[in-house]
Image (tube, helix red, strand yellow):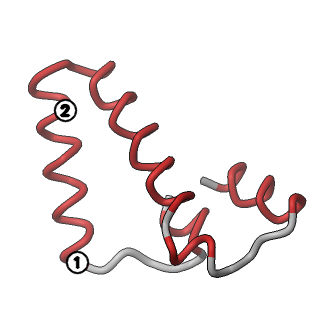
Amino acid sequence: MYIGLLDRLLDAGGLAYYEAILDAAYASNGIEGVRAQARNMGAQLIGSVEYQSTNPSNAMHVVRLYRA
């Protein structure tokens, strides 16, 4: 999602953080928990100041969602 939405690589600390979140989601609710958490993470990224500061056009927003 970082590459697709923010057009940048995830740093090592961020990767470990999100890996732990997805691992916990899987441990508690299986694959459905991971899917729900991934949707939540995507929504958080789209709502983030970093994403909003790129001021994407509608067309670019669609491209980024597709890539993510």
Tag on residue 25?
Answer: 2
- Residue 39 screen position, x and y as percent: 46, 37
* Point 74% across, 76% down: residue: 55
Tag on residue 68?
Answer: none
* Point 52% across, 80% down: residue: 8
The residue mark sitting in front, 1 or 2, is 2
* Point 39% across, 29% down: residue: 35
User: In this rendering, would 12 be left or right of 66?
Assistant: left
- Residue 45 screen position, x and y as percent: 48, 60
Mark positioned earlier in the residue sequence (1 or 2) = 1
| Quarter holding residue 64 | bottom right
Q: Residues within 10 Å of mark 1 (few under 14, many from 20)?
A: few
- Answer above or below: position of 25 versus 55: above
Looking at the rendered structure, the number of numbered marks drawn on it comes to 2
| Quarter holding residue 34 | top left
Q: Residues within 10 Å of mark 2 (few under 14, many from 20)?
A: some
Give the alpha-carbon distance from disc 1 to disc 2, as whole Å. 20 Å
- Residue 12 screen position, x and y as percent: 23, 78
- Residue 54 screen position, x and y as percent: 68, 80
Q: Say which amino acid is labelled 1.
A: Ala
* Point 72% across, 49% down: residue: 66
- Answer above or below: position of 33 versus 59: above
Secondary element at image label 2:
helix
On the image, numbered disc 1 is attached to which residue?
12
Marks 1 and 2 in Cβ contact (< 8 Å)? no
Q: Say which amino acid is labelled 2.
A: Ala
Q: Residue placed farthest to the right in the image? A: 59
Secondary element at image label 1:
helix
User: In this rendering, would 50 be left or right of 12?
Assistant: right
